[in-house]
Amino acid sequence: MNYNQKINELKINLPKAADPVGSYVASKISGKMLFISGQISIDENGKLIKGKVGKDLNTEDGYYAARRCALSIVAQIKKACNDDLTIIKSCVKLTGFVNSTDDFVEQPKVINGAS
């Protein structure tokens, strides 16, 4: 099963790949590698998900934010590949950052939303 089929099977609606708002590119192909710029968490209504996990957001909210961020990454990948995810063989690296309070300890649970 390829990535397009899996997305359809899971009934995932990818967001529109956002255009860069600064002096950077959203994606860059170098050899056989595709690099995607950092993405942010936007909900289904186009609203920025903001706040600190452990204060403004709970673990479940953080998980959702990480999931939405990952979907933005996939949307950028799809755009960079001219809507053909079948050419993607694997993900080499995914870096995630959790904006959390000093006493919050469930960052791995939050980042799992991106997997």
Image (cartoon, rainbow, N blue to C red):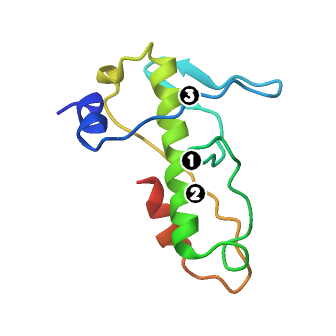
| Label 1 element class | helix
Residue shown at 42% from the left, 36% from the top: 13
Q: CA distance from mark 3 to mark 1?
A: 12 Å
In the rendered view of the protein, which quadrant contains the C terminus? bottom left
Farthest right residue? 23
Residue shown at 54% from the left, 78% from the top: 106
First in sequence: mark 3 vs mark 1 = 3
Counting from the top left corner in percent of width and height, residue 9 is at 23, 39
Is mark 2 in CB contact (under 8 Å) with mark 1? yes
Q: Is residue 26 left or right of residue 59?
A: right
Label 1 Cα neighbours within 10 Å, binned few <14 / some 14-19 / many ≥20: many
Residue 69, labelled with which disc?
A: 1
Judge whether 52 appears above or below 70 on screen: below
What's the amino acid at mark 3? Lys
Is mark 2 in CB contact (under 8 Å) with mark 3? no
What's the amino acid at mark 1? Cys
Q: CA distance from mark 2 to mark 3?
A: 16 Å
Label 2 Cα neighbours within 10 Å, binned few <14 / some 14-19 / many ≥20: many
What's the amino acid at mark 2? Ala
Q: CA distance from mark 2 to mark 1?
A: 6 Å
Q: Quadrant of residue 112?
A: bottom left
Instruction: Give the labeled residue for mark 2.
Output: 65
Q: Nearer the viewer, mark 3 or mark 1?
A: 3
Counting from the top left corner in percent of width and height, residue 92 is at 42, 41
Query: Which residue is more in the foreground, 113 or 16?
Result: 16
Counting from the top left corner in percent of width and height, residue 49 is at 68, 55
Instruction: Give the labeled residue for mark 3.
Output: 16
